[in-house]
Amino acid sequence: MIPLLVLWTGLGQRQANATSLVAIIPIGIAAVPIYYFNRGVPQVDLRVALFLIVGSMVGAYLGARALKRIPERQLRLGVAIVMLLVGIKQLVLP
């Protein structure tokens, strides 16, 4: 989502990161009833989900604070490197 926000909307890297984090909230809320209440058997492990929620909230807070200190060019380079590594991983270990 972040690369599309940068390329298609012209947002800066910092603003694209923040916007994508905010966009995840309604997506997650909409998905809960589908995965939890569909077919009578929950598809969600609530214990694991709780750990993910806590870790994500802490990570989002720390990441947002760090985002203020990282120059735009370095942030773009970091996102590009992560995308490249994920792409390589997908090719090597699908």
Image (tube, grey):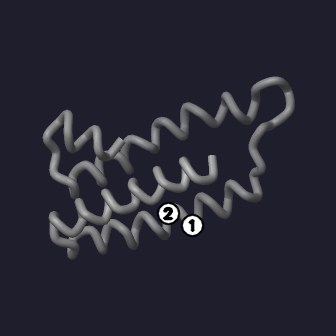
Could you tell me which quadrant the N terminus lies in? top left
- Circle 1 packing at 10 Å, graded few (<14), some (14-19), many (20+), is few
Question: Measured along the vertical axis of the image, is residue 93 above or below residue 1?
Answer: below
Amino acid type indicated by mark 2: Met
Q: Quadrant of residue 11?
A: top left
**What is the secondary structure assignment of the residue under circle 2?**
helix
Question: Measured along the vertical axis of the image, is residue 38 above or below residue 66?
Answer: above
Measured from the top left, where is residue 94 in percent x and y?
63, 46
Say whether residue 73 is left or right of residue 29.
left
55 or 70: which is nearer to us?
70
**What is the secondary structure assignment of the residue under circle 1?**
helix
The alpha-carbon separation of the residues under discs 1 and 2 comes to 5 Å
- According to the picture, the residue beneath numbered tag 2 turns out to be 57
77 or 52: which is nearer to us?
77
Residue at 54% in and 40% down: 28
Total numbered labels placed on residues in the image? 2
32 or 11: which is nearer to us?
11
Measured from the top left, where is residue 93 in percent x and y?
63, 52
Measured from the top left, where is residue 7 in percent x and y?
20, 39
80 or 69: which is nearer to us?
80
Question: Measured along the vertical axis of the image, is residue 85 above or below residue 21?
Answer: below
Judged from this view, the residue extending furthest toward the front is: 92
Say whether residue 89 is left or right of residue 47.
left
Residue at 25% in and 40% down: 5
Q: Are marks 1 and 2 in contact (CB under 8 Å)?
A: yes
Residue at 68% in and 59% down: 50
Picture disc at residue 9: none
Judged from this view, the residue extending furthest toward the right is: 41
- According to the picture, the residue beneath numbered tag 1 turns out to be 55
Amino acid type indicated by mark 1: Gly
Measured from the top left, where is residue 65 in percent x and y?
30, 72
